[in-house]
Amino acid sequence: MSKVLIIGAGGVGNVVVQKCAQLPGVFSEIVLASRTVKKCQDIAASLKRPITVEQVDADDAKQVAALVGKHKPQLVVNVALPYQDLPIMDGCLEAGVDYLDTANYEPKDVAKFEYSYQWNYHDRYKDKGIMALLGSGFDPGVTNVYCAYAMKHYYDEINYVDIVDCNAGDHGHPFATNFNPEINIREITQKGRYWENGQWVEIDPMSIHRDINYPEVGPKASYLLYHEELESLAKYIKGLKRIRFWMTFGEQYLTHLRVLQNVGMTRIDPVDYEGHKIVPLQFLKAVLPDPGSLGVNYKGKTSIGVIFDGVKDGQRKQMMIYNVCDHAECYKEVRAQAVSYTTGVPAMIGAKMILEGKWKGKGVFNMEQFDPDPFMADLNLYGLPWKIIEGKTIDN
């Protein structure tokens, strides 16, 4: 029986709360906090059990620490913005409580993913006797656990890894992003990177693409991006020679994105407008559809997995671990589209691992550092069942 404080009431926050509320034996008390209390109240009204709602400015570590001190949770689940990871981690450190997030810290003024900001907290968290679990979403998150599971059960060494992420759904809008527009567009317009032969290789944004055949979806044009799980997995996978991340984008989406870039709407530096400083990308976020609203008419599936190529008992072995998720089924269960669902469910499971003592430690950790078996079992129980294809490569 544990109390959890969830910070963030967007599309993913809604899923985390809904899934936690389904397990009162683990999450006996739930506190949901956001800058906008109305969002918390709307989520609370949709539940069959009561939760507490609070207002908090997650940019302010003192406010976070004060809220933790007021409610004394066993764990803080951060599903706010990546900019707010560090102040929330600071608040948890001050209050002496465990921390979990779904995406690594990103400074506001630079489109840049880097775990070093959060890894630098390791000694302070260790000295405080608390733990931080980083990246407990799908990618990062489930993909890291897939890698740990493959290392534990199927490989002596893994030489090549390709993380492949396909959203084959249709939300009916001319242009919309499946999670926070500001974060999504920053992510895909920065330089691409992959790790090969002990070093990072940098490429121009969206400059490498290929068709990948996704299970239960089929061939889709996929683009090589940088994604934060590459940074931690490059450290922990035995025998690794190359790791890459691929994501699908439709031509309509890319056309809209190119136009927005060309007219300056994806800029992250402030511009003067009628005597005010505004960030074009933040303004764009305000006029685009809210990702949390997309689920109503969303049709189709996501297909996300990891393709492995390595060695077992002296023989080459190729395989894929993956999940397919249906947008309409997700909406039916928790009134969310599949992109929010596939992030929110692993956040709940990661929290469950910590609260049940199945994953524990002192310091800052990535998902692949823990035993994957209980997490993989819970994926099958709570909405993200996985499958294995033997002999699967990125070309078939």
Image (cartoon, grey):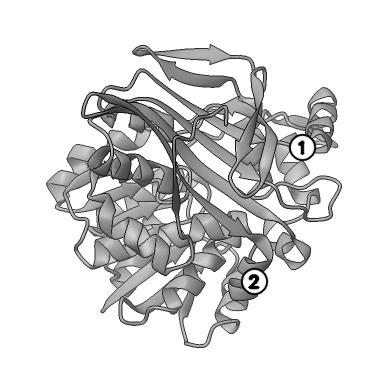
In-image side of 362 versus 279 (left or right): left
Residue hosting label 1: 250
Q: How many C-alpha atoms fall within 10 Å of the one at disc 1: few (<14), some, or many (≥20)?
A: few
Q: Nearer the viewer, residue 70 or 296?
A: 296
Q: Residue at x 35, y 39 (%)?
A: 147
Q: How many labels were placed on the picture? A: 2
Determine whether 150 is above or below 231 in the image: below
Q: Residue 333: image x %, image y %? A: 59, 74
Relative vertical location of residue 10 with respect to residue 108 in this rendering, above or below: below
* Position in image of residue 224 (x %, y %): 59, 25
Residue pictured at 57% horizontal, 31% vertical:
396
Task: Pinpoint residue 342: horizontal percent, then vertical percent.
Answer: 53, 56
Please give left or right for residue 77 compared with residue 36 in the image: left
Residue 299, compared with residue 210, is above or below; it is: below
Of residues 302 and 253, the one drawn nearer to the viewer in this rendering: 302
Given residues 2 and 59, the one toward you in this image is 2
Q: Amino acid at mark 1?
A: Gly
The kind of residue tagged 2 is: Arg
Dot 1: what SS? loop
Query: Which residue is the site of mark 2?
Result: 335
Residue 105, labelled with which disc? none
Q: Quadrant of residue 175?
A: top right
Judge left or right: residue 103 versus residue 75. Answer: right
Q: Nearer the viewer, mark 2 or mark 1?
A: 1
> Marks 2 and 1: CB-CB under 8 Å?
no
Residue at 52%, 88% in the rendered image: 48
Work out how far the residue at label 2 is from the one at label 1, CA to CA, in angstroms.
25 Å
Q: Is residue 305 left or right of residue 234?
A: right
| Residue 338, horizontal then vertical, whole percent | 61, 58
Residue visible at 27% across and 22% down in the picture: 239
First reached walking from the N terminus: tag 2 or tag 1: 1
* Quadrant showing the N terminus: bottom left
